[in-house]
């Protein structure tokens, strides 16, 4: 199955919000509803109604519009349960970074397993990939994976924020190396798309892990 992915980059942290059209007309799935709600609403209008919002993790730049979009469209928000402590810091973190106040989004579905999620014709494989945050999660849809701040083009997520763990991140990256085919398209939380093949060949953080996997 071939899916159509569109992205919008918003906010001071230049976070990528992804929109995936569903088979049923005028519906979409949103991954990481970032800042600038009005910009995201304009994109949503080209689809219609979001059926759900999947959060890769609870950092403020990835969920800045979740509350407003949930209120407007009455669509559920999904997040891994282990990121609840990070989510609880949402309002304080906005103050810390000098952003306008915004209410903490209410989570409708706490992810606690890696059971597949289904929305219309889409089946989403859930991959818990802690390291950047305890509940960081990648969502794999066919030949695409949405990695949040776990893996980027040419680099990986930081682990110096509360809840971060370099050892856990390396274990998560090793899992991605082992399980994702070379041709998998990687959609990161920031920056351009890439592929697993490119990252295995060029990413300085993955190359040592790949050597370990192959040994």
Image (spheres, rainbow, N blue to C red):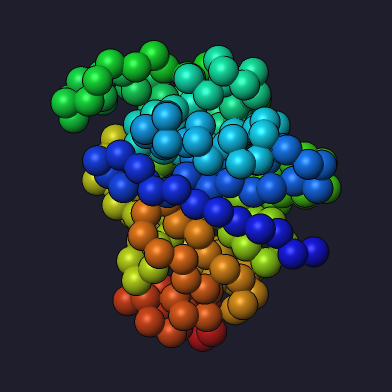
Q: Is residue 91 above or below residue 197?
A: above
| Residue 136 visible in the shown view | no
The answer to whether residue 71 is left or right of residue 194 is right
Which is nearer the eye, 170 or 42? 42
The N terminus: image quadrant: bottom right
Q: Position of residue 30 (x, y in %)?
A: 59, 40
Horizontal arrangement in the rendering, residue 198 relative to residue 145 (left or right): left
What residue appears at the point 42 percent right and 29 percent down from the top-left corner? 37
Tally of marks: 0
Nearer to the camera, 126 or 55: 55
Q: Name which residue lies at 22% across and 25% down.
A: 99
Q: Is residue 183 above or below residue 54?
A: below
Residue beneath the point at 27% across and 44% down = 13
Find residue 188 and report its horizontal and vertical position in percent. 45, 57
Q: Position of residue 71 (x, y in %)?
A: 55, 15
Which of 87 and 6 lies nearest the eye of the viewer? 6
Q: Nearer the viewer, residue 120 or 158?
A: 120
Report which quarter residue 38 is drawn in.
top left
- Please report the residue visible at 34 percent of the width from the left and 17 percent of the height from the top: 102
Q: Is residue 26 visible?
A: yes
Q: Where residue 76 sits: x, y (%)?
A: 64, 24
């Amino acid at each position: 199955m071939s899916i159509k992915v569109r992205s919008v980059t918003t906010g001071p942290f230049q976070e990528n919000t992804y929109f995936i059209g569903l088979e049923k007309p005028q519906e979409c799935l949103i991954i990481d509803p970032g800042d600038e709600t009005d910009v995201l609403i304009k994109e949503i209008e080209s689809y219609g109604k979001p059926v759900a919002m999947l959060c890769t993790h609870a950092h403020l730049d990835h969920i800045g519009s979740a509350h407003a979009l949930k209120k407007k469209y009455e669509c559920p928000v999904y997040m891994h349960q282990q990121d609840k402590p990070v989510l609880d810091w949402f309002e304080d973190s906005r103050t810390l970074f000098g952003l306008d106040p915004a209410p903490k989004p209410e989570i409708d579905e706490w992810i606690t397993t890696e059971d597949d999620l289904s929305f219309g014709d889409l089946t989403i494989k859930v991959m818990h990939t802690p390291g950047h945050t305890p509940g960081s999660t990648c969502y794999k849809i066919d030949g695409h994976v949405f990695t949040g701040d776990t893996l980027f083009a040419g680099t990986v997520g930081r682990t110096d924020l509360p809840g971060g763990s370099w050892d856990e991140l390396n274990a998560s990256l090793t899992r991605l190396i082992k399980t994702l085919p070379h041709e998998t398209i990687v959609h990161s939380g920031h920056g351009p798309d890439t592929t697993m093949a490119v990252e295995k060949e060029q990413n300085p953080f993955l190359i040592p892990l790949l050597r370990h996997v192959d040994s």
